[in-house]
Amino acid sequence: MNSMQVISLTLLSVLAVSAEVLRFGRCPKPAVQADFDPSMYIGKWYEIMKLPTFFQKGECGTATYSTKGPGVIGVLNSELLADGSTNSILGSAKVKDPAEPAKLEVSFNASPPGPYWVLSTDYEGHSLVYGCRDYGIFLMEFSWILSREPTIPEETVEKLHGILSSIGVDVSKMVPTYQDEAFCSAMIQ
């Protein structure tokens, strides 16, 4: 094996271990929310479902967005861990191209920015977020269904699953986030 094959095999191994949704192919280029208004997106959202990620290990997930400046949104993601502690991380999301404000790039700490594309939102009930990165012949996908409340109607979930399925996402891999009010009250908001 030459050194390039070893590097490729190592990268693939790392990605397979750290990202649960890795598959062959190239990232799709889905349509995003038309006329997206970041100012209406501000506030608290509850995580309803997600494609599994290596960086989220808890339940009761929330994302709180705030205005930081023109084209920049502050991000506070929080979750309740199994030991009862709250895990939170601060970041920012930036509009990459003002002509497509629903295509944001989000970054946390010193991490490189990643795609955060709002595929669908009504601002008051649901949001469907998708991100994808190409790694050679593989792609790694992220997706979240968010709601302004800890629950969401099943018909809304089905509609959002339809959007994801239409771009090739295997929605059977999505996992629900536990949002029980009594259980999640342990999380310091």
Image (spheres, rainbow, N blue to C red):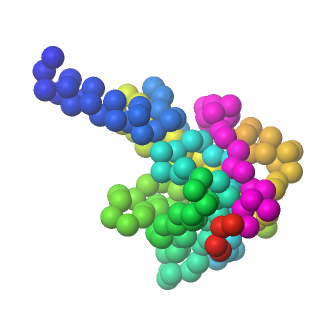
Q: Is residue 3 magenta?
A: no
Q: Please state, as top left, top right, bottom left or bottom right, where the C terminus lies in the image.
A: bottom right
* Residue depicted at x 65% and y 39%: 174
Q: Nearer the viewer, residue 93 or 150?
A: 150
Q: Residue furthest top?
A: 1
Is residue 177 visible to the viewer in this orientation of the structure? yes
Q: Is residue 107 left or right of residue 177?
A: left
* Residue depicted at x 63% and y 46%: 50
Q: Nearer the viewer, residue 59 or 21?
A: 59
Residue 158 locus on image (x, y percent):
80, 41
The region drawn magenta spans 165-185
Q: Residue furthest left?
A: 2
Q: Please state, as top left, top right, bottom left or bottom right, where the N terminus lies in the image.
A: top left
Q: Is residue 74 left or right of residue 50?
A: left
Q: Is residue 112 above or below residue 9?
A: below
Q: Is residue 178 magenta?
A: yes
Q: Is residue 26 above or below residue 43?
A: above
Q: Nearer the viewer, residue 11 or 118?
A: 11
Residue 142 locus on image (x, y percent):
54, 45
Q: How many marks?
A: 0
Residue 19 locus on image (x, y percent):
46, 39
Q: Is residue 188 above or below residue 118?
A: below
Q: Which image quadrant for residue 187?
A: bottom right
Q: Is residue 98 above or below residue 121?
A: below
Q: Residue furthest front?
A: 83
Q: Nearer the viewer, residue 155 or 85?
A: 85
Residue 166 locus on image (x, y percent):
67, 34
* Residue depicted at x 42% and y 64%: 108
Is residue 27 visible to the viewer in this orientation of the structure? no
* Residue depicted at x 55% and y 50%: 57
